[in-house]
Amino acid sequence: MTSKERLTELIKKQIVIEEQVSKDIEKQLEMVNTAAAKLLLTEMKYDARKHAAILQDILEVIANSKVQLWDYKTSSYVDKLVVKKELEKHIIIEKDTLDMAKEEIRHTDDDGIKLLLQHIAEDEDRHHTLLRTIVSNSYKINS
């Protein structure tokens, strides 16, 4: 078995797991009775669905390409400079959102709200990092 085939099999197994996790959490949502638990479980359910979708897209790239993912090109024309500027604007928005979440955390005494806001802050921080990675890897402007 080649490494590509092995990776494909691992990803397929992970997709099944993520889909099952989403279904299991859906059932567990009916069993919990606190807002914080429901909100966190809902996020986990959507994350599992998102993970399955990402893994499915990775399978498609693996099946259709012999290049690395960052080098894989889609078949559409876009103005790189326009896209780069839009993504850079979104980076600023993500940073502002992260700062607001951190400020909100400092101003609440409710541990449940703090936990949820911290969760949002961590997501915003990760989004900020992802956007910077996308800009640096996909939208290099050659002089």
Image (spheres, grey):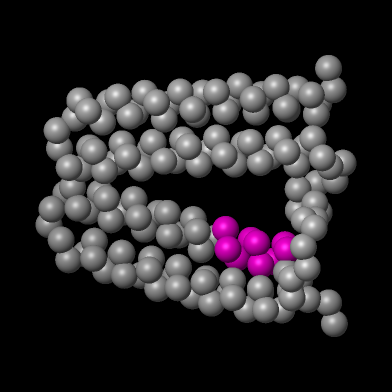
Q: Residue at x 34, y 28 (%)?
A: 25
Residue 81, compared with residue 131, is above or below; it is below
Q: Quadrant of residue 57?
A: top right
Q: Residue 137: image x %, image y %? A: 72, 62
* In magenta segment, residue 137: yes
Identify the magenta region: 130-138
* In magenta segment, residue 4: no
Q: Quadrant of residue 62?
A: top right
Q: Residue at x 31, y 54 (%)?
A: 118
Q: Residue furthest top?
A: 1
Q: Residue at x 48, y 37 (%)?
A: 49
Task: Give the side of residue 121 with respect to residue 34, left or right.
Answer: right
Quadrant holding the N terminus: top right
Task: Give the side of residue 3 with respect to residue 109, left or right.
Answer: right
Q: Residue 97: image x %, image y %? A: 38, 68
Residue 92, compared with residue 64, is above or below; it is below
